[in-house]
C-alpha cells in the first residue's frame, strides 16, 4: 500500500461513525450552523489564524465543538483532537493557492489544508448540508451510515460476481492448457479479473475505514473474496512470460497503475504485461503447475523448469528423469510425478 493510500485510510478512520470528530460533525449538521475546524498546530497554523480567543486546556467533546460552531469564526483543535485550542478564529490562507471548490468555506478549507498540512473539516450551513474533510491533497465527503452501508453492500456483490468469474477463468485456462489450445486472451482474462478484484478490494478497504467498527463483517467477507487472487495471477503471468519475471515482481506493480477504462480493456492489460496479441496461441512454461506441488523448494522448481521448457514436457516427465535433477531425489521425484500426471516408474532404482 502506498503512503498516500495509508494516510487516506488513517484519515477516514478518524472520522468513522462513533468517533468524536464524526459525532461533532453530525451535531453541527443537525443544528445547521456550519463550521470550519482546523485540526493541527505549529507555526504554519499560527501564520494563518487571527482574532478569536484561546482556550486553556479545554477537553474536546462533540457537544462543545457543536456549541462553539454557532459562532461566526473557525475552531482550532490540537492534532490528536483531544483539546480545543481556540474558537471564533479568523482564518487567512494564501489566496493564490489554487482550488476548484465552490463556496467560500470550502475554498478556505482546501487552501488551509494545503498551506498548513493540517486536517481541515468544512461543514456547510443549513440549506445545502454536506461535510468535507481536507488534508494536504486528500479530500473526501463524509457520507451517512445508510449511504456507506448501501455502497459497501453493492461493491461486495460486485466483488462476489468478479471472484466467480475469476475462478471460472482459471478453470477454463486449466482446460485449455491440457488441450494445448491456450491463447493470450485466456491468460489476460485471468489477470484482468484479478486486477479488477484488487481494485474492488481497495475500494471496500476505504469504505470499511469510513464505517469503522460497523464494517467488521464486510471487511471479513471482502478479505475472503480477495484471498489468493494475486498469487494465482502472478503465477499465470510468470507461466506465459518469455523470460522469468524478476524476483519480487508482481502484476500489481503494473496493472494497478492502469486507469479504470484500461483495466477493462484486454489489449491494454496485455500491453502493460508485455504478453502480446490476444488471439495468438500461448505456451505455458509449467510454473503454475509446478507451484501446486506441496513442499517443493523454489530452487528445485527453478531447476526442474530449466530441464523441462514446456508444459507438455513437464507433464510427460517420469520419476526416473526427475530424480536426476539436483535437489529432487527418488522419493521426491515420485511425488512430483504423481502431481504432474507423468509416469511414476515404480521400478526406479
Image (cartoon, helix red, strand yellow):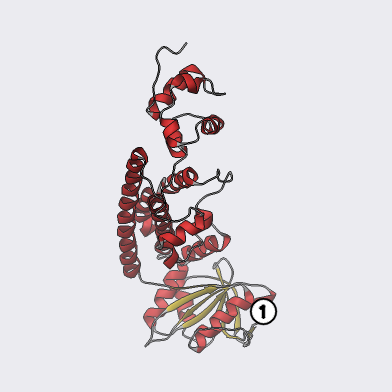
Total residue callouts:
1
Q: Is residue 218 visible?
A: yes
Foreground residue among 85 and 268: 268
Q: Residue at image x 39%, y 84%?
A: 32
Give the structural element (helix, strand or loop) at label 1.
helix
Foreground residue among 246 and 157: 246
Q: Is residue 273 left or right of residue 344?
A: right
Q: Which x, y percent locates residue 44?
A: 67, 76
In the picture as drawn, the residue positioned furthest to the right comes out as 43
Foreground residue among 179 and 11: 179
Q: Is residue 292 visible?
A: no
Q: Quadrant of residue 118?
A: bottom right
In the picture as drawn, the residue positioned furthest to the front comes out as 280
- 10 Å crowding of disc 1: few (<14), some (14-19), many (20+): few
Q: Residue at image x 63%, y 78%?
A: 115
Q: Residue at image x 33%, y 47%?
A: 167
Foreground residue among 276 and 124: 276
The residue that mark 1 highlights is 46
Q: Which x, y percent locates residue 203?
A: 42, 62
Please tell me whether residue 2 is drawn above or below residue 242 in the rendered image: below
Q: Which x, y percent locates residue 334?
A: 43, 20
Q: Residue at image x 59%, y 46%?
A: 246
Q: Which x, y percent locates residue 67?
A: 46, 80
Please tell me whether residue 163 is drawn above or below residue 106 in the rendered image: above
Amino acid at each position: 500500500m502506498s503512503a498516500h493510500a495509508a494516510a487516506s485510510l488513517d484519515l477516514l478512520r478518524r472520522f468513522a461513525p462513533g468517533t468524536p470528530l464524526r459525532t461533532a460533525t453530525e451535531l453541527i449538521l443537525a443544528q445547521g450552523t456550519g463550521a470550519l475546524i482546523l485540526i493541527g498546530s505549529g507555526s504554519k497554523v499560527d501564520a494563518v489564524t487571527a482574532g478569536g480567543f484561546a482556550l486553556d486546556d479545554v477537553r474536546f467533546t462533540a457537544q462543545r465543538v457543536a456549541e462553539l460552531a454557532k459562532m461566526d469564526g473557525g475552531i482550532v483543535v490540537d492534532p490528536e483532537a483531544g483539546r480545543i485550542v481556540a474558537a471564533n478564529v479568523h482564518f487567512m490562507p494564501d489566496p493564490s493557492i489554487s482550488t476548484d471548490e465552490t463556496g467560500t468555506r470550502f475554498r478556505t478549507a482546501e487552501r488551509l489544508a494545503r498551506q498548513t498540512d493540517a486536517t481541515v473539516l468544512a461543514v456547510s450551513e443549513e440549506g445545502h448540508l454536506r461535510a468535507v474533510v481536507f488534508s494536504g491533497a486528500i479530500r473526501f465527503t463524509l457520507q451517512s451510515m445508510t449511504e456507506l452501508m448501501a455502497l459497501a453492500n453493492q461493491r461486495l456483490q460486485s466483488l462476489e460476481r468478479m471472484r466467480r468469474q475469476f475462478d471460472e477463468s482459471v478453470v477454463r485456462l486449466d482446460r485449455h492448457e491440457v488441450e494445448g489450445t491456450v491463447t493470450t486472451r485466456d491468460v489476460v482474462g485471468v489477470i484482468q479479473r484479478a486486477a479488477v478484484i484488487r481494485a474492488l478490494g481497495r475500494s471496500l478497504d476505504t469504505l470499511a475505514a469510513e464505517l469503522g467498527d460497523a464494517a467488521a463483517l464486510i471487511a471479513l467477507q471482502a478479505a475472503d473474496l480477495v484471498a489468493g487472487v494475486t498469487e494465482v495471477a502472478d503465477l499465470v503471468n510468470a507461466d506465459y512470460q518469455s523470460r522469468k519475471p524478476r524476483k519480487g515482481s508482481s502484476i500489481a506493480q503494473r496493472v494497478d497503475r492502469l486507469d479504470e477504462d484500461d483495466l477493462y480493456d484486454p489489449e491494454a492489460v496485455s500491453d502493460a504485461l508485455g504478453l502480446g496479441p490476444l488471439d495468438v496461441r500461448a505456451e505455458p512454461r509449467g510454473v503454475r503447475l509446478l507451484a501446486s506441488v506441496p513442499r517443493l523448494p523454489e530452487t528445485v522448481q527453478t531447476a526442474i523448469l530449466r530441464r523441462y521448457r514446456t508444459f507438455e514436457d513437464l507433464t510427460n516427465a517420469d520419476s526416473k528423469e526427475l530424480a536426476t535433477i539436483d535437489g529432487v531425489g527418488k522419493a521426491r521425484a515420485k511425488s512430483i510425478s504423481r502431481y504432474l500426471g507423468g509416469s511414476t516408474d515404480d521400478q526406479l532404482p
